[in-house]
Amino acid sequence: MMITMIVWCLIAVSVWYVPSRLKKLLGLRKAWPWHALFIGVVVGYALLLLKGVYTWDSASIAVIFNALGLLLVFFIYLFFFLAVTHPLSFLIKRIAGRSLGICGISVSALFVILGFINAQSFVVVHYDLPVKGLERPVRLVHVPDIHLGTQRGESWLKKILNAVNEQKPDMVLYNGDLVDSNLALKPELFSLFKAVDAEQYFTLGNHEYYMDTDKALQLIADAGIRILRSEMIETHGIQLIGMEYMNADRETYDAHAVNALTIQEELPRIARDAEKPSVLVHHSPVGMRYAAEGNIDVMLSGHTHGGQFFPGTALVKYRFPMYSGRYQIGGTTVLVSQGAGTFGPWMRLGTRNEVQVINLLPAASSQ
């Protein structure tokens, strides 16, 4: 909550500061057009986001949502540039105000463009994890946060699924936020999953709750993907535990809470054999200590996007201590994916879309 408040306070300050500063630097007659533009972007984007309008089945809404998101980040970057360079106008008299203003606009636009370009590709990352009690190697592909909807559609999904098939996995785990908008709820789009030559499983993320949840789950099931909602199945010699989105416990704050469930309470209710290898799949990297206390071997999560772009990349660690990559809690290995897609402003800066390939190995063969 504190981080969210800080971000919105910075945006509020920038609404006043950026137009006023540009007026002085560029010698503009009036600052109010910039004030009006900035306020329109902030208010418009906030309404689309907070009121859930972005989830509507509308291509026009998607275009507006993406355009406002990129403009908002442009203004935020411009705010940082102008604030950091503000003292230069006093310390270095030779710097012309107009040049500084033009430079700020150019640099901010460049960062947004580079971030947008970076968001149009993904990387495949590999992890080898030794697992006690595993009798033979098992290859998993972990793909959370595809975010089909306002930004991702058929072409993106085809690229992701082609990369998945190239890895020849034993199973594929779509760990939440597969869709984020009713715009993506088309049978022809979900039929693409039928081309995957492996077992496929899905757990719910928070975004599936913000839209037509029943229709989304029906399309996922019709595509041949098994939905795991706080249950365990045995496959390929492991106990695969899939949990729908929930908070860690009743004391921890969660800005995206969608139900009253908690990992602390739900995980012990799932019957399993403590002597057999176990993999816990939960969209958000919370409740890791409960996974460790339950002797889970591997926990897979996404949700954080690694912060997606600055300043999120600098703030995410305060919200999620385990936000990207590999971690260890006792005997439990935690892998947090940056996600295979984006949400909000359509860009990545300092992060990458990724598909995780996880080779589970018998513990003896890792030595």
Image (tube, rainbow, N blue to C red):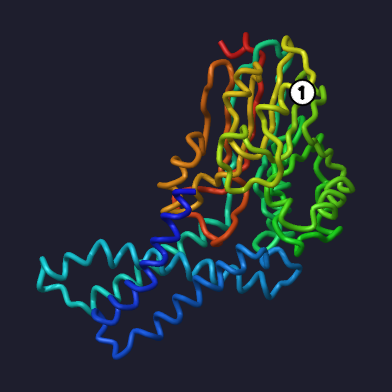
Mark 1 secondary-structure assignment: helix
Left or right of 123 on screen, residue 190: right
In the image, what residue occupies the spot 24% across and 81% down? Answer: 24
Check the picture and name the quadrant holding the C terminus.
top right
Observer-nearest of 256 and 251: 251
In the image, what residue occupies the spot 21% across and 67% down? Answer: 86
Q: Is residue 125 above or below residue 275?
A: below
Left or right of 219 on screen, residue 115: left
Q: Position of residue 174 (x, y in %)?
A: 72, 41
Q: Position of residue 180 (x, y in %)?
A: 70, 56
**Residue type beneath disc 1:** Arg
How many marks on residues?
A: 1
In the image, what residue occupies the spot 57% across and 60% down? Answer: 344
Q: Which residue is mark 1?
A: 269
Observer-nearest of 127 and 295: 295
Rendering quarter of residue 262: top right
| Residue at the bottom extreme, as displayed | 29
Q: Is residue 9 above or below residue 47?
A: above
In the image, what residue occupies the spot 28% across and 67% down? Answer: 82
